[in-house]
Image (tube, rainbow, N blue to C red):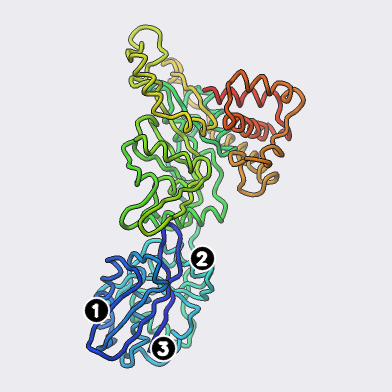
């Protein structure tokens, strides 16, 4: 008898539906598991056998063939264990499953997720939200998941039944009474460790640039000597962003669940902030590994990626930023195929002007001792094509010691965040929800970036004066559009255009 049970597996940060098929036939006792599986899945044979025996059931003493379909899809992890055990119990004639439970398993509009211990207990798995959401979209009407994953899986929108053991699942399937369902996750109370702008003394121009970047979703690079406040500005950026929308929160939570990074229960409602060290590898930035994990760029999706000391990152890591900065996605080609990962984030980068950081100083102990060729080589680490994709380049100058002792007066981030929310609301009304100015291109850019008469007349001279490339010109137009949105203006004025060019020149 062939039995089928529905489950799912992770493919990158996405999920795919998998059918577990079990056939118990004549022949010597053996277990064969097929379907392009990794070692963790192959070891499920021993976990499932022990879990069935130790739960009071009988593992079939015949030839057992288990297939995970579709066969061409690579299978990784331990989330298949529960489905495999139920398929084996259903297909065997003398497994003590029970008639009512066997009939309940005939219903293929239900899904099963969970890792089995040798004693039959069910353990949590990573990526429960992505797995359950996929099964819900595929038509599953109820799901059985580990209790530790129940609230997360319940956010998929279908009834989710938390279970702790294989025996408990079988007992539930054999009942005619209602089975308790889990409640979906509530919002997380965590708001991250961002700084308030009031903690950064002076620096009005960089703060203004942060507000513009947050309002339009633009990338920004701060350059300046050590101690001028570049890193503090980068840490304050996430505090200017509005909360994630429900759809964005679900996506971000699913990604962090796949990576095993959900530190507390609840949907992630604040934009994620990722700040990898400059020694991180290309795989750490983009994602990959034997057991695939999303990289820093994907973990920053719908949030902020802070790259402190940008020129110190490996050259291959810097050049790999080009596609996600422009398209918001990463295409990874690996042995088992190509994966498309989401990576739409705001980049906030910092850089020193030279290796010692004191380039531009004219006298005294602060004078730069780096040879000109060394300074030029250091600055070339950030290539022209990469720098061209960063909309705002801002110089951060040191603040005098007498100004550092001034006490901040109230929050500056809260009113700035209010202006950002209002500007984003204008963009949502004009371009559709979630479409920010940073993503404007082609006909949409021409339609949205309307210039008044003075700005139109001065545009050719501004383009020539700043030596703008084609990409640079469109970048200036997008930033000018955001500045106009912050002012509540429907058209771009000359002042908006000049300010956008000033940030472009750095």
Which is more N-terminal, label 2 or label 1? 1
Residue under the image location 25 percent in, 88 percent down: 61
Residue tagged 2: 156
Which of the two residues, 496 or 281, is positioned nearer the viewer here? 281
Distance (Cα) linking label 3 and label 1? 20 Å
Which is more N-terminal, label 1 or label 3? 1
Residue under the image location 52 percent in, 54 percent down: 249
Distance (Cα) linking label 3 and label 2? 26 Å
Mark 1 secondary-structure assignment: helix
Residue tagged 3: 102
Distance (Cα) linking label 1 and label 2? 31 Å
In this view, 466 is above or below 430: above
Give me the disc on residue 50: 1
Residue 362's image quarter? top left
In this view, 386 is above or below 358: below
Residue under the image location 48 percent in, 37 percent down: 347
């Amino acid at each position: 008898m062939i039995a089928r049970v529905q489950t799912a597996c992770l493919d990158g940060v996405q999920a795919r539906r998998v059918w577990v098929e079990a056939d118990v036939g004549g022949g010597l006792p053996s277990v064969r598991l097929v379907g392009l599986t990794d070692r963790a899945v192959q070891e499920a044979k021993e976990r499932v056998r022990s879990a069935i025996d130790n739960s009071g059931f009988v593992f079939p003493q015949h030839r057992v063939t288990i297939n995970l379909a579709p066969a061409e899809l690579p299978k990784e992890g331990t989330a298949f264990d529960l489905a495999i055990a139920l398929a084996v119990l259903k297909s065997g004639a003398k497994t003590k499953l029970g008639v009512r439970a066997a009939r309940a398993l005939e219903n293929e509009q239900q899904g099963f997720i969970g890792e089995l211990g040798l004693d039959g207990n069910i353990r949590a798995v990573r990526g429960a939200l992505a797995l359950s959401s996929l099964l819900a979209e595929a038509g599953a009407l109820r799901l059985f998941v580990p209790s530790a994953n129940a609230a997360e899986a319940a956010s998929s929108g279908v009834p989710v039944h938390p279970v702790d053991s294989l025996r408990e699942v079988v007992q539930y399937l054999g009942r005619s009474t209602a089975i308790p369902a889990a409640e979906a996750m509530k919002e997380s109370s965590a708001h991250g460790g961002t700084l308030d702008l009031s903690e950064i003394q002076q620096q009005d121009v960089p703060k203004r640039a942060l507000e513009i970047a947050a309002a339009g979703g633009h990338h920004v690079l701060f350059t300046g000597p050590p101690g001028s406040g570049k890193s503090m500005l980068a840490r304050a950026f996430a505090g200017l962003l509005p909360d994630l929308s429900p759809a964005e929160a679900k996506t971000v939570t699913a990604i962090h669940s796949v990576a095993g990074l959900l530190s507390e229960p609840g949907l992630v409602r604040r934009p994620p902030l990722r700040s990898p060290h400059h020694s991180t590898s290309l795989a750490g930035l983009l994602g990959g590994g034997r057991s695939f994990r999303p990289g820093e760029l994907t973990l920053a999706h719908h949030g902020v990626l802070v790259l402190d000391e940008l020129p110190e990152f490996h050259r291959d890591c810097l050049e790999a930023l080009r596609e996600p900065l422009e398209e918001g996605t990463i295409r990874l080609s690996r042995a088992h195929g190509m994966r498309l990962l989401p990576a739409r984030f705001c980049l906030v980068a910092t850089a020193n002007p030279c290796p010692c950081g004191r380039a531009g100083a004219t006298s005294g102990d602060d004078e730069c001792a780096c040879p000109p060729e060394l300074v030029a080589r250091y600055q070339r680490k950030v290539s022209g094509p990469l720098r061209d994709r960063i909309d705002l380049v801002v110089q951060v100058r040191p603040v005098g010691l007498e100004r550092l002792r001034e006490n901040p007066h109230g929050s500056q981030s809260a009113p700035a965040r209010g202006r950002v929310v209002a500007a984003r609301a204008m963009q949502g009304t004009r371009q559709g929800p979630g479409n920010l100015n940073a993503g404007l291109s082609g006909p949409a850019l021409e339609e949205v970036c309307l210039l008044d008469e003075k700005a139109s007349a001065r545009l050719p001279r501004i383009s020539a004066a700043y030596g703008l490339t084609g990409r640079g010109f469109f970048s200036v137009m997008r930033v000018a559009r955001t500045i106009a949105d912050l002012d509540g203006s429907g058209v771009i004025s000359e002042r908006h255009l000049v300010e956008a060019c000033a940030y472009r020149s750095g």
